[in-house]
Image (cartoon, helix red, strand yellow):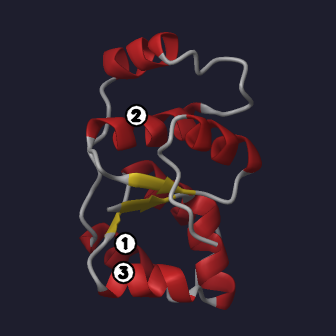
Amino acid sequence: MILADTSVWIDHFRSGNKELQNALNSGQVVIHPWIVAELALGSLRDRAKTLAMLDLLPHARVARTNELRLMIEARHLYNLGIGLTDAHLIASVFLDPPTLLWTRDRHLRKVSEGFGIHANLP
C-alpha cells in the first residue's frame, strides 16, 4: 500500500500523475485524514466531489497522541525539519506495514528514506 502525502496529491490535482492514478486504479492507495484536511484548506476543482472521493479511500491507521510521542522519541524524529503532520504520516506507515510513504517534500523524503519506508515513485 502507498500513503501519498499532500505534495503528491497537489501535483496530481494540478497536472495529473500517472503513477498515482495507476496506484488508485489498482487499489494500492490509502489516505490519512490529516492529508484530506490539508487538501480541504486549499483550492480544489470540483471541491465537494474531490473531498468525497478522498474520503472513500481506505484510511491509514492514525496514531494516538501517546503513540506518536513515543515514536518521536524512539525514532529520534526531532530536529529533522519535519512537522506534526509529517510525523503522523510516518507513524501511520509504521503502524500499517507494508505501507510505504510517497512524498515530494525534501525533509520528509530524507527521513522516510532513512527508515526504509519511502515509496520510490517519481
Amino acid tagged 3? Leu
Q: Residue 110, percent across and down?
A: 69, 41
Amino acid tagged 1? Leu
Q: Residue 76, percent across and down?
A: 57, 15
Element class at badge 3: helix
Element class at badge 2: helix
Looking at the rendered image, the quarter that the N terminus falls into is bottom left
Q: Residue 84, percent across and down?
A: 56, 32
* Structural distance between the alpha carbons of marks 3 and 1: 11 Å
Residue located 31% across and 72% down the image? 28
Residue located 43% across and 15% down the image? 69
Residue for badge 1:
54
Residue for badge 3:
24
Element class at badge 1: helix
* Structural distance between the alpha carbons of marks 3 and 2: 22 Å
* Structural distance between the alpha carbons of marks 2 and 1: 20 Å
Residue for badge 2:
91
Mark 3 closeness class: few <14, some 14–19, many ≥20 residues within 10 Å: some
- Asked if residue 99 shows in the view, the reply is yes
Mark 2 closeness class: few <14, some 14–19, many ≥20 residues within 10 Å: many
